[in-house]
Image: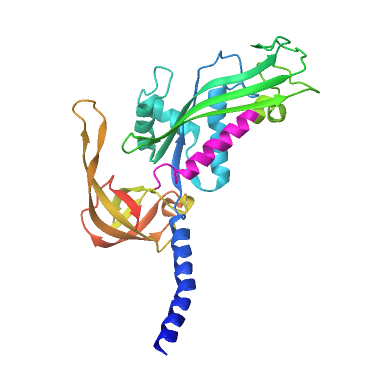
């Protein structure tokens, strides 16, 4: 009888465990990573422009932003917000956004992850009768045509400045006969871009970048918010309904110590963290824009602006 009773409890426990795990996983997905996508550096011949006049580096950054927003898994900052911070802090004055400057700007915006990159290939090629690859001119007609898009992309943790992922993405689309793309330096509209070989290659590259970010769990795999202020005995954090936070959710609060750097290389070695308390969301729409929450204190004292907030 005892064995039957034990087996019954074990069998009963399996669906309960699976249900509990599913609930925990769903809750872990609630809060959205905050991502800042910076304009990509164009390392090609600068001949190409988007249908709205943008250079490819700006156009690709906008495409990534749109794709991330459509996924529903991230809160993505507007390009205007990013450019304003870059200008105010005189970052990227050299014309290229570095992981260091992106991390600094991203941190000031409140983003966890900064996406930076460079376009290394963008355009068309033809295969001559001799088999050698050459660029073709406007309106050329050949039997074989291909478009290549190459991107170097990096995901940067804005808190530590660490490069979490670096990848080279290269996409090639071929047309082996029939109608061929006209290689204009600027597309008339988005539809023509989407229908072109280079447009299709670009879309595939963007999809790979979004997939890579998802595989990284949004980069670091740990959602974070920050304490904005204490108000009337409650804690205000910079995450709300817009980032998926719900009333009743509980978070741990940590204090980050002084950053340590390697004396030889200057590389960041991280910083020690101390757990200082626990909070619970009371109102996830503080300020009426869904970007901040009011939380009651469950444990701890002396919460300060800049303290790190994470899910339990």
Which quarter of the figure is the N terminus placed in? bottom left
Question: Residue at (43%, 29%) from the top-left corner?
Answer: 84
The quadrant holding residue 205 is top right
Residue lying farthest to the right in this orientation: 178
- Camera-nearest residue between 57 and 4: 4
Q: Position of residue 30 (x, y in %)?
A: 46, 55
Residue lying farthest to the left in this orientation: 263
Q: Is 143 placed left or right of 309 in the picture?
A: right
- Magenta region: 201-221
Which quarter of the figure is the C terminus placed in? bottom left
Q: Magenta-highlighted stretch: main secondary structure?
A: helix
Mark yes or no: residue 174 visible.
yes
Q: Position of residue 22 (x, y in %)?
A: 48, 63
Q: Is 17 placed left or right of 262 in the picture?
A: right
Residue lying farthest to the bottom in this orientation: 1
Q: Is 178 placed left or right of 295 in the picture?
A: right
> Above or below — where is 157 with respect to 52?
below
Q: Position of residue 81 (x, y in %)?
A: 45, 33
Mark yes or no: residue 233 visible.
no
Question: Residue at (50%, 17%) from the top-left corner?
Answer: 43
> Above or below — where is 146 with respect to 254?
above
> Above or below — where is 132 with respect to 248?
above
Would residue 203 be counted in the magenta stretch? yes
Question: Residue at (58%, 44%) from the top-left corner?
Answer: 70
Would residue 161 be counted in the magenta stretch? no
- Camera-nearest residue between 139 and 55: 139
Q: Position of residue 239 (x, y in %)?
A: 41, 50
């Amino acid at each position: 009888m005892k064995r039957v009773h034990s087996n019954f409890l074990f069998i009963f426990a399996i669906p309960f465990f699976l249900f509990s795990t599913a609930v925990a996983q769903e809750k872990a997905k609630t809060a959205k990573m905050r991502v800042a996508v910076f304009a990509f550096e164009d390392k090609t011949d600068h001949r190409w422009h988007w249908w709205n006049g943008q250079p490819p580096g700006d156009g690709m950054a906008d495409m990534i932003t749109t794709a991330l927003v459509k996924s529903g898994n991230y809160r993505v900052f507007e390009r205007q917000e990013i450019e304003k911070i870059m200008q105010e802090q005189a970052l990227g004055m050299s014309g290229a956004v570095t992981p260091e400057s992106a991390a600094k700007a991203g941190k000031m915006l409140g983003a966890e992850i900064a996406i930076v990159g460079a376009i290394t290939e963008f355009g068309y090629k033809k295969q001559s009768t001799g088999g050698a690859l050459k660029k073709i001119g406007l309106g050329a007609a050949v039997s074989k045509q291909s478009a290549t898009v190459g991107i170097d992309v990096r995901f940067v943790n804005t808190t530590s400045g660490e490069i979490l992922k670096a990848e080279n993405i290269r996409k090639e689309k071929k047309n082996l006969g029939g109608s061929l793309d006209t290689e204009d330096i600027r597309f008339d509209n988005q539809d023509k871009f989407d229908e072109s070989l280079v447009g299709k290659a670009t879309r595939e590259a963007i999809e790979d970048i979004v997939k890579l970010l998802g595989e990284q769990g949004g980069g670091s795999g740990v959602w974070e918010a920050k304490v904005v202020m204490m108000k009337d005995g409650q804690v205000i954090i910079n995450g709300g309904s817009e980032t998926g936070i719900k009333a009743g959710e509980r978070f741990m609060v940590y204090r980050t110590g002084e950053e340590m750097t390697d004396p030889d290389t200057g590389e960041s070695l991280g910083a020690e963290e101390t757990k200082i308390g626990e909070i619970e969301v009371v109102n996830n729409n503080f300020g009426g824009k869904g970007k901040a929450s009011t939380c009651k204190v469950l444990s701890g004292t002396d919460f300060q602006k800049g303290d790190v907030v994470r899910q339990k």
